[in-house]
Image (cartoon, rainbow, N blue to C red):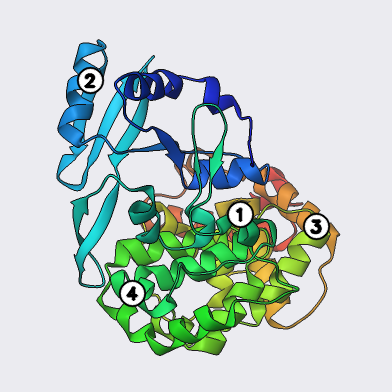
Amino acid sequence: MTTLDAPWLHGPARGVCTMLEDAGYQAWFVGGAVRNALIDVPVSDLDLSTDALPETVMSLAKAAGLKAIPTGIDHGTVTIVSNGEPVEVTTFRRDVATDGRHAVVAFSDSMEDDARRRDFTMNALYCDIRGKVADPLGGLLDLHAHRVRFIEDPVTRIKEDYLRILRFFRFYAWYGDTDAGIDADGLAACAMYADGLDGLSSERVTSEMLKLLSASDPAPAVAAMGQSGVLMHILPGAARDVVAVLVHLEQILGLDPDPIRRLVALGGERDCLRLSNAQQKAIDVRLVDMPLTELAFRNGADAATDRYLIEQASMTQPVDPARLVDFEAAAVQIFPLNAADLMPALQGAALGKSLKLAEAKWIASGFTLAKADLL
């Protein structure tokens, strides 16, 4: 029997588990928390699964003096606030009908039913309050082998929700054994049904792509996306090979993964993505046509560093760490002139033109011209 011990087993969710078990119901942590704890990866979200119906969960919480919010009660999910921390509790479910985006579910009292409606075997792992792990579909072997595998038939899982195509590549990027290669059956199914991605919302697609590109090394996953034809549905015209070179350069310089940097490097058309204003601005800044030191001065060292790395990666060229030092220095420069220095001799448009000309000369000098020189 596999067991685990994790801090969240002793946190606020413990009281919710006890509440359910004391009433004669099952209470199991499920999914990402169990998966990550088993391979010693940080856990971000906690999800509980139970055979208690949502209305029963609400009643038990009220009786225990806990706040219960029917956040997704039609789909079986109740959020319980325990010691100030929200805990999502979802009734075991089975799919009745799916359309590739949404599912009609029925409640179940069976963990096996609940496990079979999930996407990958490594996500169908459960753990009770005592740390006992339940593995109804053989996910433990896949998890420890770093094998991302659809539950049962890949085609069936994909047709239930076409976003699972992108999740397949994202999980491969984060958890897969790239030496062993991607699961062939899963890859073939993704290639066969890649057209299904066209019906998904831009928000869902964007979220998955940015998560994928945040992995330590997403290059093998991106290459597999290109091989299967999936990438052309997300970023038509993308240069998939540049990511491997970019990741190599990032690692040489000790830089953290940055999904925006990698997205810009991929290129292609981003029409099917829905980026935030901040994300779009970051992309636009990295594409602006100006010398790198000027880019660092106007938009910060990170923007210039990213553009430099992307350019070098696209040409398969090495990087010079000294350039990054130059960008840092340029980013903190302060233009020594201001409008008052040229007034009253100059006014209006002439004043603005002179300031712009002086700034251009100052930048071209490598920020060495002093105020007196510029005047």
N-terminal-most mark, 3 or 4? 3
Foreground mark, 2 or 4, reads 2
Helix, strand or loop at label 4? It is: loop
Foreground mark, 3 or 4, reads 4
Circle 3/circle 4 CB separation < 8 Å: no
Asked if 91 appears above or below 18 in the picture, the reply is below
Task: List x then y, in percent, for residue 325.
Answer: 80, 52
Residue at point 35% right, 27% down? 86
Q: Which residue is mark 3?
A: 253
Crowd class of label 4 (few under 14; some 14 to 19; many from 20; radius 10 Å): some
Spatial CA distance of label 1 from label 4 is 36 Å
Kind of residue sitting beneath label 2: Leu
Circle 1/circle 3 CB separation < 8 Å: no
N-terminal-most mark, 1 or 4? 1
Residue at point 61% right, 30% down? 6
N-terminal-most mark, 1 or 3? 1
Task: List x then y, in percent, for residue 84.
Answer: 37, 17
N-terminal-most mark, 3 or 2? 2
Q: Which residue is mark 2?
A: 60
Residue at point 55% right, 27% down? 130
Kind of residue sitting beneath label 3: Leu
Spatial CA distance of label 2 from label 4 is 44 Å
Kind of residue sitting beneath label 4: Cys
Circle 1/circle 2 CB separation < 8 Å: no
- Answer left or right for 256 relative to 81: right
Q: Nearer the viewer, residue 327 or 54?
A: 54
Q: Which residue is mark 1?
A: 140
Tell me the number on the disc at residue 272.
Answer: 4
Residue 195 visible in the shown view: yes
Circle 1/circle 4 CB separation < 8 Å: no
Task: List x then y, in percent, for residue 274.
Answer: 33, 64
